[in-house]
Amino acid sequence: MKKKSLFSLVLILAIGMVLSACGDSGNGGSSDGGGEGGDPVTNLTMGTGSVGGVYYPLGGEMANLWTDNIDVEGFDVSSVESGASVENIAKIQSGDFQLGIAQNTTMINAINETGEFEGKTTDKVAVIGSLYPEALQVVTLESTGIESIEDLKGKKVAIGPPGGATREAAELVLKAYGIEEGDFEAYEEGFGDAKSKLQNGTIDASFAVVGVPSSTTDELAAATNEVKFLDIEGDALKEVTEKSQYEAYTVEPGTYEWQTEPVQTVTAMALLLGSTEQISEDLAYKITKTLYEKSGDMTIAQAKLITKDSALTGVSDDLPLHPGTEKYFKEVGIIE
């Protein structure tokens, strides 16, 4: 009896292993989500940014646009909150995300293995296209008495969450003004939380690299009626642009209805990125085509800036295009 029982147990285990192997091979990586390596998938996850920024709502609208217009078996896009640029690139590279939004400056660092990506290879991430320009907003309230970025020494400052381009930009600007780590109290907040803490007096100022006009800044102005922008100018502006891919930029009066003075700052471009391993050429072609031909169906303000004419703005020659994107851009004459 003991021998028979042992034989039965072994037989059950063997059958289980065979069924498991068959089940694995049946998936073939054709429809499951990411994180499993290089097989193309159709159920995609897209990293966006923190609630309160533009990446998060834009990601949701793009996901809906694609799922409503792309007819591919098993196709779906889930947009998720993330730490933004750095995290999105890293997770596309690792296979945890298949799509993501990131600044062109961060993508350049990733390809060149500099900054947050020093010593890290990024060879599975490619550009699907340019989205819209972003400006670095350094915001405080009139009641704080802060007049310039130099005044942030010793203050409580939101510098953005780890894994986002805002964090890198904030540290770059503060250093250009002679403010090092430890010279201020850093708060690693997303845009929405930073707005709330600035409004209730928990912090004194916040940094945000965000599309303008920003709904979060508008909400802060409506709640306090005392929003004040801090300019990046002079030698500090020169240092920031020379040591990074950022370019000088002016937020013109009237960008916000309540804004009466120009704001000198820096800008970068937001890019849509995709996995070259987990998104097939055909699917990337459909994603690109839908984005640039139907962006008008989205309601977010930045959607009107997503056009074929600006599809490669901020995309330097050393940034790779996804093969499917390249096929579409050649088809419509954006590239030769």
Image: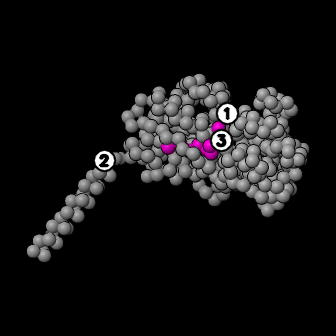
Q: Position of residue 329 (x, y in %)?
A: 57, 29
119 relative to 175 in the view: left or right: left
Q: Position of residue 169 (x, y in %)?
A: 74, 48
36 relative to 273 in the view: left or right: left
Looking at the picture, tell me which residue is in the foreground, 325 or 75. Answer: 75
Residue at 85% over, 56% down: 153
Q: Residues within 10 Å of mark 1 (few under 14, many from 20)?
A: many
Q: Are marks 2 and 3 in contact (CB under 8 Å)?
A: no
Q: Main secondary structure of the magenta part?
A: loop
Residue at 85% over, 45% down: 143
Q: Residues within 10 Å of mark 3 (few under 14, many from 20)?
A: some
Q: Position of residue 122 (x, y in %)?
A: 58, 51
Instruction: Say whether disc 1 or disc 3 marks the residue closer to the N-terminus.
Output: 3
Q: Which residues are magenta?
A: 45-54
SS for tag 3?
loop
SS for tag 2?
helix
The Cα atoms of the two marked residues, 2 and 3, are separated by 41 Å
Q: Which residue is mark 3?
A: 52
Rendered-image quadrant of the C terminus: top right
The Cα atoms of the two marked residues, 1 and 2, are separated by 41 Å
SS for tag 1?
strand
Question: Callout 1, which amino acid?
Answer: Tyr
Q: Residue 51 sits in which quadrant?
A: top right
Question: Callout 2, which amino acid?
Answer: Gly
Q: Which residue is mark 2?
A: 26
The question of residue 201 being in magenta is answered with no
Q: Are marks 1 and 2 in contact (CB under 8 Å)?
A: no
Residue at 81% over, 44% down: 140
